[in-house]
Amino acid sequence: MTTLGARVLGGVAAAATAVGVAGLTAVAFGPEADVRTAVGSSVIELTPGPVKEWAIQTLGTANKSVLTIAVLIVVALLAAVAGAAERPRRPVGSAMIVAAAVLGCAAVLSRPNSTAVDVLPTLIGAACGVAVLRYLTSPRRVEPDAPDAGRRASLLGLGFLAAGTVSGVAGVVLTRLTTAVTGDREAFALPAVDEPAAPIPPSVQPAGVQLPSFVTSNADFYRIDTALTVPQLSRADWQLRIHGMVDREITYRFDDLDEFEVVEEVVTLTCVSNPVGGDLVSNAVWTGYRVRDLLARAGVSEDADMVLSQSVDGWTAGTPIDALTGADALLAVGMNGEPLPVEHGYPARLVVPGLYGYVSATKWVVDLEVTRFDRAQAYWTRLGWAERGPIKTASRVDVPRAGQDVPVGPTVFGGVAWAQNRGIRTVEVRIDDGPWQPATLGDGYSGQTWRMWSFDWEARDPGLHTISVRATDNTGYTQTSERVDPVPDGATGWHTITFAVR
Ligand SMILES: Nc1nc2c(c(=O)[nH]1)N[C@H]1C(S)=C(S)[C@@H](COP(=O)(O)O)O[C@H]1N2
Ligand SMILES: [Mo]
């Protein structure tokens, strides 16, 4: 009879071996065969919409690391239970590993580009896991009479645990090395721009206050997507298929794009999940091709009112066709003068001014299905988000930060406001319960971009104060005070910051 401690260690070591061997073997099969990614992605998919929403809002870009750690902890706990339950004649723990493997295979098979052979690494890993568990918990292993038997068993368990972990890490590293498109991206020279964006005057940026840069650097640009591992799609492997309600189906290869005019546009992207005052909004100079030109060759049916765009990893967005046949929707290949960063959609993504990302900004885009809103549903729409996602007029205070100390005397506050496609007309600021006062606007660049504002203020009364902001767009609409959550079509309400004068 083995001790409980030895069995628990055996369970965890067996799980590490199973996952490690599966991960390492998957390198030979390609990214679709990685059961870890498949399970993580399935967890993301099966997580109820409101929980996903909560994770995006509270954890932001860190939500995937948190998920990974959570999954690891759950697996370790289950493995401990499996080990504790394992008996030579009653292999409950082994059965748990087999059950986990079945779920893992199902997860692998549910991935968009997987095939039947992709379950092999999972099966091989599970077989190794069961073997290790049987071995470590067999009574012959631990002879209770031998004085150092317990110690030998623990060392053996720790050895398998370490070997499994090392294999797992090696699998991750090797997968990165063998699939990364970093080199492909570095070798890509952006096409020469036929229609450049108007120069951005320095006057877009208010003086005297530290605000976000009008153009967000690629490193600082917010990132939101459901991809647990960033899809690695080379230009050679990239294709864009246009089909559905079209006169003729077309598949473009990356080189085919050379036939189209290259345009540059400055567009502010915004996430529908952005809470009031949140930072899921960024602005970049995009280089690419007009979606309109790409669609024209296929000949779009008059009856179509939506394009369902799909990424290589199966995510979808439903965009009103009018937004894509307008002049400014882009198939972007460049971001701030560089190829798209891999996490922002390399080699090609959609950028559609005026619409939240979830209905328009498909990264790693490979498929455009011309269809109708009453025939097709996109990823987030299926989860209860609005079918249409025009960006709401919004504004944010960046200075002061919440809780910041403001010294008595003259000071400059500031922030940003956006109402893509309409443009910002005025921004007003209110201190405490005072009157709304106009802020000073940085120069407007275009309706598709955010606008910076600043506000000169004399700090006199020490103590706590608040600053609120509201914007009016060029249609004359002023932001409502009514606080609404991001679900289902974007947050509303004024952003208010509490600060202290000292
Ligand atoms: N393939 C793919 N594209 C996607 C998403 C996604 O989950 N998968 N998320 C969308 C959402 S919700 C937003 S807000 C934008 C964010 O783009 P960014 O990460 O480049 O800022 O990408 C969109 N494109
Ligand atoms: Mo989003």
Image: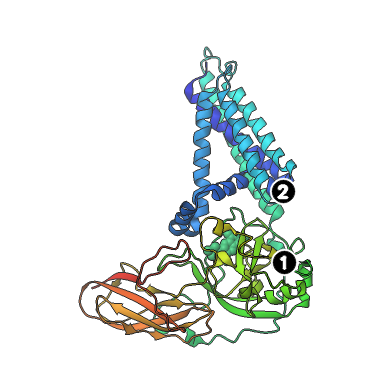
In the displayed structure, 434 sits above or below 378; it is below
Q: Secondary structure at mark 2?
A: loop
Amino acid type for the residue under numbered disc 2: Gly
Residue 245, disc: 1
The residue singled out by tag 2 in the image is 30
- Front residue of this view, candidates 350 and 391: 391
Which of label 2 and label 1 is nearer to you?
1
On the image, the x and y values in percent for residue 170 come to 65, 45
Mark 1 and ligand 1: say if the CB distance to the nearest ligand atom is below 8 Å: no
Residue at the (52%, 15%) spot, across then down: 1
Q: Is residue 20 above or below residue 1?
A: below
- In the drawing, does residue 134 fall left or right of residue 187? left
Q: Secondary structure at mark 1?
A: loop
Query: Is any part of residue 138 visible from this angle?
Result: yes
Name the residue type under label 1.
Met
Q: Residues within 10 Å of mark 2 (few under 14, many from 20)?
A: some
Q: Position of residue 323 (x, y in %)?
A: 61, 74
Residue lying at 68% horizontally and 44% vertically, measured from the top left = 109
Of residues 361 and 15, the one nearer the viewer is 361
Within-10-Å neighbours for mark 1: few <14, some 14–19, many 20+: many
Q: Position of residue 345 (x, y in %)?
A: 63, 64
